[in-house]
Image (spheres, helix red, strand yellow):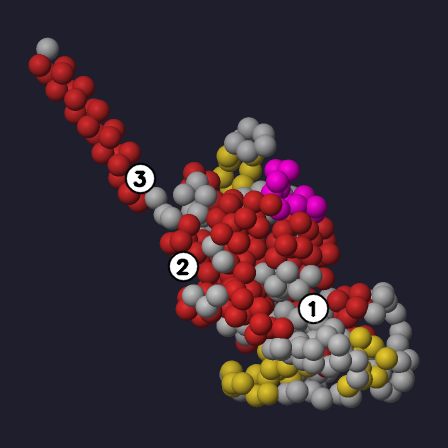
Amino acid sequence: MKKIRFTIVYAIFATLATLYATAQSRQTREEYIERYKSIAVAHMERYGIPASITMAQGILESDAGNSALSLSSNNHFGIKCKKNWTGRKVYHDDDAKGECFRAYSSVEESYLDHAEFLDSSPRYDSLFSYPSNDYRSWARGLKAAGYATAPDYAERLVAIIEKYNLHLLDQQDGDAIYSSGKNAKENAEYFAIQSNLNRQEAVGIDPFRISSSIHKGYNVYRTNNTCYVVAKKDDTYASLGKTFAISEKMLRRFNDVAKSDTLAENDIVYIERKKDRWLGDALLHEVRENEDLHSLSQTFGIRKKNLARLNHLRTNSKVEKGQTIRIR
């Protein structure tokens, strides 16, 4: 009898100890933000997805890294397998029983796949017309595009962003600003003076070329706060992608070129995602001879589809010499 009592007491104690250990090891939202915010900011700079949105989705979809799915598969964004997924899989009850979810070797891999998933899926194209600091439009857009089925998904993302001041991450040097605790009002005033939206003058081409570093024999320049290199003789998108550890497919996407397009010597090649508009003061540009939407998008570091949208044009529309084009 004593042995049975001891066994029962021991079992209860072991269960309580396990529950206590689980509670003690549970990651808080603050810890989650601190651990992954730098990745979110880096992906914002490359892909244009607000860091605040990435962090809020990670917190919501993975319960700040504590959900069963995230612990078993490193899947922090609830991305399901889909037809084109060839990686590791796990099965988890969600909208239906035993649904297929993507599994990753690391959380960092999950963050990268999230960025590439949004960037490469046509259903999310409209989101990239919003500035990367417009987290409210991004939240509504994700819901409208069907990222999640919860009717209040957008509101839940916004609530997380505003509770934890994640919008600070969306600003230039957002990681440092967030860590320093600089308040939102100061930053709103800072960004308000960066561009004067009432200025209407046209701007001629100024490459605004700043050499920021050298990598494997290439000068890395920056324009519109976006890095690019100048192609050398015999360069290809594949060879440059290998040099800068970017897939050829992604490099072509960064530069708005088709699979059949080839590189010419002295072509501008962006090695990160271009911005959705010009970040400087100038609002307009007067088209010069031999310019088209693609060459202008490369000159100013603006995504071609965004440049077209700013001017109510199609991406294949022609522009004429002397025509005034809006760049922000």
- Is 100 or 291 nearer to us in this picture? 291
User: Residue 5, relative to residue 187: is it above or below?
Assistant: above
- Is 158 or 204 nearer to us in this picture? 158
Q: Secondary structure at mark 2?
A: helix
The residue lying at 54 percent from left, 70 percent from top is 187
Task: Give left or right: position of 255 versus 75.
Answer: right
Which callout, 1 or 2, points at the residue further toward the start of the chain? Answer: 2
Which callout, 3 or 1, points at the residue further toward the start of the chain? Answer: 3
Amino acid type, mark 2 = Glu
Report the disc number at residue 23: 3
**Image spot of residue 300 (x, y percent):** 71, 79
**Image spot of residue 285 (x, y percent):** 80, 82
Q: Secondary structure at mark 3?
A: helix
**Image spot of residue 252 (x, y percent):** 68, 69
The residue lying at 89 percent from left, 80 percent from top is 323
Amino acid type, mark 1 = Asp
Amino acid type, mark 3 = Ala
Residue tagged 2: 34
User: Do labels 1 and 2 touch, CB within 8 Å?
Assistant: no
Residue tagged 1: 276
Span colored in magenta: 143-154
